[in-house]
Image: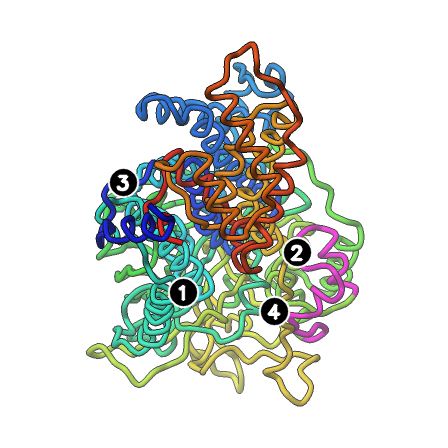
Amino acid sequence: MSRTERRSRRSTRLSWHRDHELPAGTVLPSVLAAAAGLVAMWPFTAVIQPGPWSSTVLLVIVAIALTGMIVRTSMRRRPSWARDLTAIGVQVAVAAGLIVLVVAGDTAVLGVIPTESTVFVFQTLASAAWEEIVYGAAPIAASPGLEAMMGAGFAVVAVLLDQLIAQRGAVLAGLLTAVIGSVPMIVTLGGVDIVWFIALAIVVLALLRYSGAQDRESPRRSSVAVAMGVGVAALVATVAVAPLLPVSASLAGTGAGVTVDASLRLGDDLRQPNPVEVLTVATTADTAPYLRLTTLSEFDGRVWEPDRGGLQSQDEGFGPAEWTDDIETTDRATSIRVIRMSSAWLPVPYPATDVQGLPASWRVSPDNRTLASRTADAVGSDYTVRSVEVSPSLEQIRAIPAADAVADPDDEAFEIPEVVSETAAEVTAGATNDYDRLIDLQSWFRSEFTYSLETPVDEGFDGTGADAVERFLDVKSGYCIHFAGAFALMAESLDMDVRIVVGYLPGALTDTTRGEESVYSVSSDQLHSWPEVRFPGVGWVPFEPTASLGVPTAFTAAATTGGGSAEPSTPAPTTAPTAPASSGPDIEREDAGDNSGATSQLRTLDPAPVLLTALGVLVALLLPALIRLAVRASRRGRARRGDAAAAWAELRATLQDLHLPLSDAETPRMRGDDLIGDDRVDAEAMRTIVAAVERANYARASSRTAADLDASLGAVLADLRHSVDRTARVRAFLVPRSLFVGGRVDPALLTP
């Protein structure tokens, strides 16, 4: 029977579906798992500043993929259950040892075997990481705690992805990748990252194609062009149509969102372009109140720490009144609806006395009359807060000394910089009481300084540490945290009990009403901080030192004498700073130029996550090629020593890689004759290899000779590669088919 007839008979036996399942791959599942892990990790670089954690996660993902690949390759002839259990066990051990080595290697035996000290270190890091996640704002600063937790978390994800893909669970693997990757966008209420979405879609399509190709019901051949066309069409349709879908504007999470914490790292948030509405306030008062999230009282010279005192249930109330009966007060009710603000604190006016409409997970902090939760998020909350306006007269507030500064004996003593103390004494030299001293400080800041979001960045003091305050007093330009931080240190140098508040300025009045209540809209650029000082019998009195922003605190006299008669004065203001309804704070920036909208510099892109991701993808893409080169080198080394089986195995593998005809039914001589007849290889070199294989299979052991076959094998392999086009050679190098199809041959290769 001629070669043409044999091929014709093979072709007639082909059907639409495969007649058997392809054996499980050993390399491609791990490559796909590594790619899926990198795609899942990508969005986290937007909420956690790149640092050691991203390198650790990348290392863990690649190590787990390599481990799975090596175990499955070495145990490919063992039962599947033994291979899978061994792979999981080795992957867990490798991941655990790697994380211990990177995070706490100095506490472990040989750097990888954990000890009691290692366990204690990880417990401490886990607690610190939890605090940073609960109370932090995106992007959270990279820390050892986050490095440990992200490494451990993605180790679990990487093992699951690797095992799911190896078991052909493409749908579950794709779903896991999508869920993990979407978490950062969900918790920060940010918009969809289109580039990430496209990368996710590509990975999911690759997973589905791999899983489907292994099934016996899949077609023998499938059009890559058609598959790519369908995938691209689906992506384009999704990206184009999704923004046009009618989504309610009140739905939490639509559009850009804001994550707020109490770290006083407000500059990045304030510099964001295109502010969005984060909450609405409904009140019957003439103006909306300032809303506070939390307070910061402890300062160690570098940062102000948020107050995290004991929390109690809402039923226990906000604590006793801080004001005496002789101080005038007015009851107020404020309805607040949080739309796009994610935080562990809820905005409330001060001083709050009661709240309605919140679940029990929100608890009261009586120390600063705020609402906080360790499990709930502020977004979507709709509640009503009852509060009072505390309005002492000018005479009353002047007659009350400010409370003395409180020092915690357990804290390390902090010495206020000399320039801060001297400046505070100089500015307040003409005042005779504490209230007037604070008013002098407030007036000095508002008249001698300018508001700027860019100056602290340009001058290198964008922070709240003592060094930043000293630089701010010299440059005399910054934004709210610099004004509040400098004011607070000056007040403390005057021996006053002071703290900083993080919250929102009053919003802009809208045309919407709720019954008799006017509705104000608060946007993300109205995030604010201000200082307040405690006056016994009055409470905490806020001040507004930030230049050109808000309305400064000022109390009026209870009575004015003039012309021999006393007349009542205008009503005393509340202790909370108030501002008239406006479209937003009146911010004057000296660097605005002709186009105030161009004052903010574009934030530079940190190339680290992009480079790390690109490196990881490159390594994952080249892994099959590197493994195939190693296997080829090993076989050719054995062929050099006369191993005919190794030479023939490499020849068959190369035929598979190049998608050349191959059949398990053919003898080496038949295959060699076909290749020679098709003018694909050198006849003499091919016959040398075939003769060696036949001697190894049929000759007596005593008559076998171990001749060097590497030269003949090299010539045949070179001829085979030159017999196909460049595209086939590149495909064979990057995606060596012999690594994926196992010992059995894909029937699709039976046709030339």
Q: How is the image coloured?
A: rainbow
Q: Could you tell me how far apart the alpha carbons at marks 4 and 1 are, in whole angstroms?
A: 35 Å
Secondary-structure class at tag 1:
loop
Q: Where is mark 4, residue-wise?
A: 546
Please tell me which residue lies in front, 112 or 76.
Answer: 76
Q: Position of residue 160 (x, y in %)?
A: 37, 36
Q: Amino acid at mark 4?
A: Thr
Q: Position of residue 670 (x, y in %)?
A: 43, 39
Q: Amino acid at mark 2?
A: Gly
Q: Where is mark 2, residue-wise?
A: 463
Secondary-structure class at tag 2:
loop
Q: Earlier in the sequence, mark 1 or mark 2?
A: 1
Q: Earlier in the sequence, mark 4 or mark 3?
A: 3
Q: Could you tell me how far apart the alpha carbons at marks 4 and 2 are, in whole angstroms?
A: 15 Å
Q: Is residue 705 magenta?
A: no
Where is the N terminus found, in terms of image quarters?
top left
Q: Where is mark 1, residue-wise?
A: 192
Q: Residues within 10 Å of mark 1 (few under 14, many from 20)?
A: some
Which span of residues is magenta-colored?
Answer: 447-474
Image: 552 above or below 717:
below
Say which mark, if any, is on residue 21.
3
Q: Amino acid at mark 3?
A: Glu
